[in-house]
Image (cartoon, rainbow, N blue to C red):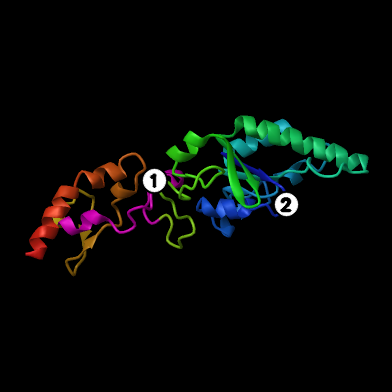
Amino acid sequence: MILVVGGIASGKRSYAHSLGFADSDMSEELSSSCPVLLDAQELVRSEDADAASLVDTLAATKQVVLCQEVGSGIVPISRGERDWRDRVGALSKNLAERADAVVRMVCGVPQVLKGTDWLESHGFGQRCAGGDHPAFGTSFFTNRACEHFPCHEGIDERDFNCLFCYCPLYALGPDCGGNFTYTKSGRKNCKNCALPHVRENGVKLVSARYEQLAELARDEGK
């Protein structure tokens, strides 16, 4: 789980977009199946909210949690608002302890407070203070905004690599090594092949065949 905190209009939702999530992946409802939860601070509006249970549920069901920082401004006059502010702070602290990564948004700029290595290893390279890295890793990219995502079955969506949307190995014909069939017109049908899209070995599989692809290109150029 990635916890994203920041003041109002600080860029939290835009950051979730940069991770590959569309608006349709986001909801303010805890019971929603959407992987991104908006406005986590509202979950503890009631003094009866079970913070411990909320943390367990969010850690188990959400990939990204957005929570507004409410403790840096003017101290509220209302006792109820002050108590709510304290509950939000406690919730954020407990979520941060459970989260794989914590990112704070300041003026639209993400600052990674925890889990830099985890973000990189899961394809979520950041533009953060002190650096200028691409929004995604160079060997892993998940485009959840794509209308066809996921275009192959059998892979956990969190591990689905969209880097090779068009498989370079297609040009190798029957020697590509994938699980393909032929259509009636004689074209390859790769619907049942997910090899290039697997996080662990997709890039290695394609990279290992680059020499064959280069040789094919040389032959075609003659």
| 52 on left or right of 77 | left
Asked if the stretch drawn in magenta spans residue 106, the answer is no
Q: Nearer the viewer, mark 2 or mark 1?
A: 2
Residue 62 on image: x %, y %: 58, 43
Tell me, yes or no, if residue 221 can be seen here: yes
Instruction: Left or right? Give the position of 194 relative to 80.
Output: left
Residue type at mark 1? Ile
Residue at x 15% of width, y 48% of height: 211
- Mark 1 nearby-residue class (10 Å; few <14, some 14–19, many ≥20): some
In this rendering, would 49 be left or right of 135? right
In the displayed structure image, the side of residue 208 where residue 82 appears, left or right: right
Question: Which residue occupies 49% across, 39% down?
Answer: 119
Query: Looking at the picture, which amino acid does disc 2 mark?
Result: Ile
Q: What is the C-alpha distance between the residues marked 2 and 1?
A: 36 Å
Q: Which residues are magenta?
A: 151-172
Q: At which x and y percent is residue 52?
A: 71, 31
Looking at the image, the residue that sits furthest to the front is 130
* Residue placed under numbered mark 1 in the picture: 155
Q: Which residue is mark 2?
A: 8
Q: Position of residue 79 (x, y in %)?
A: 92, 39
Image quarter in which the N terminus is found:
top right
